[in-house]
Amino acid sequence: MIKNAFISFQEKKEENRGSVEFQVLSFTNKIRRLTSHLELHRKDFLSQRGLRKILGKRQRLLAYLSKKNGVRYKELINQLNIRELKTR
């Protein structure tokens, strides 16, 4: 899974599961799992609520990271492939 790849990717920050990057990664994994679940079970309203809560948490963490360190934010966004790139 992506989680194992990310843990091995961060060799210098071993066992740092409290970092913003790791939290965003775990929320992204949960979001992808819940999204695939909701494709099969469209009327599972409790899972929809949980998905919205996790999306909000991830959004707040990403906003925090973009304010504190824009370079790490951009690297994380590109690595997880979460945002669409704007072309002008």
Image (cartoon, rainbow, N blue to C red):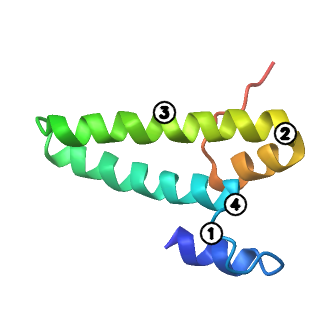
Name the quadrant containing residue 88: top right
**Does 87 sit left or right of 3 as displayed?**
right
Q: Residue at x 46, y 37 (%)?
A: 55
**Mark 4, secondary structure of its residue:** loop
Q: Residue 80 appears at what percent x and percent y?
A: 63, 54
Q: Earlier in the sequence, mark 3 or mark 4?
A: 4
Q: Are marks 1 and 4 in contact (CB under 8 Å)?
A: yes
**Mark 3, secondary structure of its residue:** helix
Identify whether 6 is placed above or below 63: below
The residue carrying mark 2 is 68
User: Residue flagged by tag 1: what amino acid is it?
Assistant: Arg
Name the quadrant containing residue 87: top right
Q: Earlier in the sequence, mark 1 or mark 2?
A: 1
Q: CA distance from mark 1 to mark 4?
A: 6 Å
Q: Classify mark 3: residues with Cα within 10 Å, few (<14), some (14-19) or many (20+).
A: few
**Mark 1, secondary structure of its residue:** loop
Nearer the observer, 59 or 32: 59
Numbered tag placed on residue 19 in the rendering = 4
Q: Residue at x 78, y 75 (%)?
A: 13
Q: CA distance from mark 4 to mark 2?
A: 13 Å
**Mark 2, secondary structure of its residue:** helix
User: Residue flagged by tag 3: what amino acid is it?
Assistant: Gly
Q: Residue at x 46, y 58 (%)?
A: 29
Q: Classify mark 2: residues with Cα within 10 Å, few (<14), some (14-19) or many (20+).
A: few
Q: Earlier in the sequence, mark 4 or mark 2?
A: 4
Numbered tag placed on residue 17 in the rendering = 1
Q: CA distance from mark 1 to mark 2?
A: 18 Å
Q: CA distance from mark 3 to mark 4?
A: 18 Å
Q: Are marks 1 and 2 in contact (CB under 8 Å)?
A: no
The residue carrying mark 3 is 56
Q: Residue 9 appears at what percent x and percent y?
A: 73, 75
